[in-house]
Image (cartoon, rainbow, N blue to C red):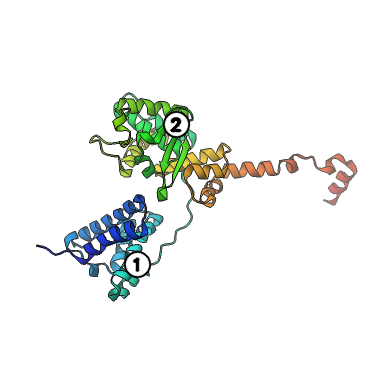
C-alpha cells in the first residue's frame, strides 16, 4: 500500500482545516484555490515528470514555483493579473505551512518571497451596444440549444453578472413578474438584487418552460446545464460565447474585439449604464463592487464621456461672443498690435 505524501497531507489539511474551518472562506474561494492546485499538479506531471501520487513538498522549491508561474503565462496564455491571482493561492498555502511545519520555515518563506509581477494598467475592453446586438444576432433562435444560448448570453449581459454568479443561478434566483429581478450570489457569498429588462424575462420564461425548469421540483436545479443535466462551468460559458463571437467577427469585424470573454460582457453592461447616465453608485451596486473606486475604472475608460463632460463644463465659456467683437475700437487696437 502506497503511503500518502506530505504534499497530499498538507494540501488536504489546508483545504479542510484552514480554508473551510479556520478562515471560513466562500465556496468561490475554495473553488478558485482548487483550480490553482489542479494546474500545479498538471504542471508537475507534464513538465517535471512527477505524477501526483509521487509529488512531495521538497519538489516545490522557489525555482519550481517561479517556473510554474512563467508556464502559466507562456504556455497557457494567462495575463499578469491571472498569474498573480494564482500565486496568491500558492502563497496562502505556504503561509499555512509556516505554522504547520516550522522546521522547514526557510523553504516556505523562500517561496513566499516571490514578488508579484507588475502590470501596466490596461484599458477596459467592452462591446458597443451595436456589438452586443451583432453578437446575439448570430445565435440561431430556431434550435433548442440556440434558444438556451440566447437566454444565457443575454442574461449574462443584462445582469452584468460574473460568470460564476451566472452558472450558480437556479430558477428560484429569478422573479419573472414585475418588478423583474435576478438575485446574484457574489464574492464572499454577498447577495445582490439586479433588475432585468422585460425582453430578457420573455426569453427566460420561454427557456424555462422548454427545458422543464418550471416544475416545483426543479426550483433549485441549475438554471443553465449541459446535456447530462450538470451545471455549466465557467469554461462552458466561455466556449458558448466564443462560438458566436467568431461568427460575429466575420460578419462585422469592426464591432467584435480580438479577445473576448464573459467578463467583457460585464464590462459592456457597466459602460452602457454609464453612457446612459446611470450614477456610478448604482452601477457599483449592480456589479457588486465593494468600493466605488473599482467602479470608477469605467468612467476613466470612456473617452467619449470625458469629451462630453469637458464640452458641457466649458460650453458657456466657448459659446460666449468675445467682448472685443462688440467693441470696434478695441478690435482695431488689437489688430494694430500685430
Of all residues, the one furthest to the top in this rendering is 142
Q: Residue at image x 44%, y 61%?
A: 118
Regarding residue 24, the answer to whether it shows in the image is yes
Q: Secondary structure at mark 2?
A: helix
Looking at the image, residue 215 sits to the left or right of residue 334; the answer is: left
Q: Does 322 appear above or below 2?
A: above
The image's mark for residue 95 is 1
User: Residue 95: where, in percent of width, then height?
Assistant: 35, 67
Q: Say which quadrant the N terminus sits in.
A: bottom left
Kindly identify the residue that appears in the image at 32 percent across and 23 percent down. Answer: 142
Q: Position of residue 66 (x, y in %)?
A: 32, 65
Q: Which of 313 and 51 lies nearest the eye of the viewer?
A: 51
Relative side of 120 to 310, left or right: left
Tell me, for residue 133, which label it has, or none. Answer: 2
Asked where in the image residue 156 lies, by quadrant, the reply is top left
Q: Badges 2 and 1: C-beta atoms under 8 Å apart? A: no
Residue 278's tag is none
| Residue at screen point 30% across, 68% down | 97
Residue 149 lies, with reference to residue 115, above or below; the image says above
- Whether residue 126 appears in this view of the structure is no
Mark 2 or 1: the one toward you: 1
Q: CA distance from mark 2 to mark 1?
A: 47 Å
Residue 237, quarter of picture: top left
Q: Position of residue 314 (x, y in %)?
A: 71, 44
Disc 1, SS: helix
Q: Rate crowding at label 1 as few (under 14), some (14 to 19) or many (20 or more) other CA atoms within 10 Å.
A: some
**Residue 16 place in picture, x, y as percent:** 28, 58
Point out the tag, 2 or 1, that comes first from the N-terminus. 1
Q: How many marks?
A: 2
Amino acid at each position: 500500500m502506497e503511503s500518502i505524501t506530505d504534499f497530499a497531507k498538507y494540501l488536504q489539511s489546508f483545504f479542510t482545516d484552514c480554508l473551510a474551518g479556520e478562515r471560513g472562506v466562500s465556496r468561490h474561494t475554495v473553488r478558485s484555490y482548487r483550480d490553482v492546485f489542479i494546474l500545479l499538479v498538471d504542471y508537475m506531471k507534464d513538465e517535471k515528470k512527477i505524477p501526483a501520487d509521487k509529488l512531495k513538498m521538497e519538489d516545490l522549491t522557489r525555482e519550481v514555483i517561479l517556473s510554474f508561474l512563467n508556464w502559466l503565462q507562456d504556455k497557457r496564455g494567462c495575463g499578469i493579473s491571472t498569474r498573480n491571482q494564482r500565486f496568491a493561492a500558492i502563497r496562502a498555502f505556504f503561509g499555512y505551512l509556516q505554522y504547520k511545519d516550522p522546521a522547514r520555515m526557510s523553504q516556505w518563506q523562500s517561496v513566499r518571497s516571490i514578488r508579484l509581477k507588475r502590470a501596466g494598467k490596461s484599458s477596459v475592453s467592452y462591446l458597443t451596444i451595436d456589438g452586443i446586438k451583432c453578437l446575439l444576432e448570430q445565435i440561431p433562435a430556431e434550435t433548442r440549444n440556440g434558444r438556451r444560448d440566447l437566454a444565457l448570453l443575454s442574461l449574462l449581459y443584462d445582469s452584468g453578472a460574473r460568470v460564476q454568479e451566472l452558472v450558480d443561478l437556479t430558477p428560484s434566483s429569478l422573479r419573472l413578474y414585475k418588478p423583474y429581478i435576478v438575485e446574484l450570489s457574489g464574492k464572499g457569498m454577498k447577495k445582490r438584487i439586479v433588475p432585468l429588462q422585460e425582453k430578457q424575462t420573455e426569453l427566460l420564461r420561454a427557456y424555462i418552460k422548454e427545458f422543464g425548469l418550471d416544475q416545483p421540483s426543479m426550483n433549485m436545479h441549475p438554471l443553465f446545464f449541459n446535456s447530462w443535466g450538470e451545471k455549466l462551468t465557467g469554461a462552458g460559458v466561455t466556449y458558448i460565447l466564443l462560438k458566436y463571437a467568431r461568427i460575429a467577427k466575420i460578419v462585422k469585424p469592426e464591432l467584435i474585439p480580438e479577445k473576448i470573454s464573459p467578463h467583457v460582457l460585464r464590462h459592456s453592461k457597466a459602460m452602457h449604464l454609464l453612457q446612459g447616465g446611470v450614477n456610478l453608485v448604482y452601477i457599483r451596486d449592480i456589479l457588486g463592487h465593494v468600493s466605488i473606486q473599482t467602479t470608477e475604472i469605467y468612467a476613466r475608460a470612456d473617452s467619449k464621456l470625458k469629451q462630453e463632460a469637458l464640452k458641457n463644463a466649458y460650453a458657456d465659456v466657448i459659446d460666449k461672443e468675445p467682448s472685443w467683437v462688440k467693441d470696434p475700437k478695441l478690435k482695431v487696437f488689437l489688430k494694430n498690435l500685430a
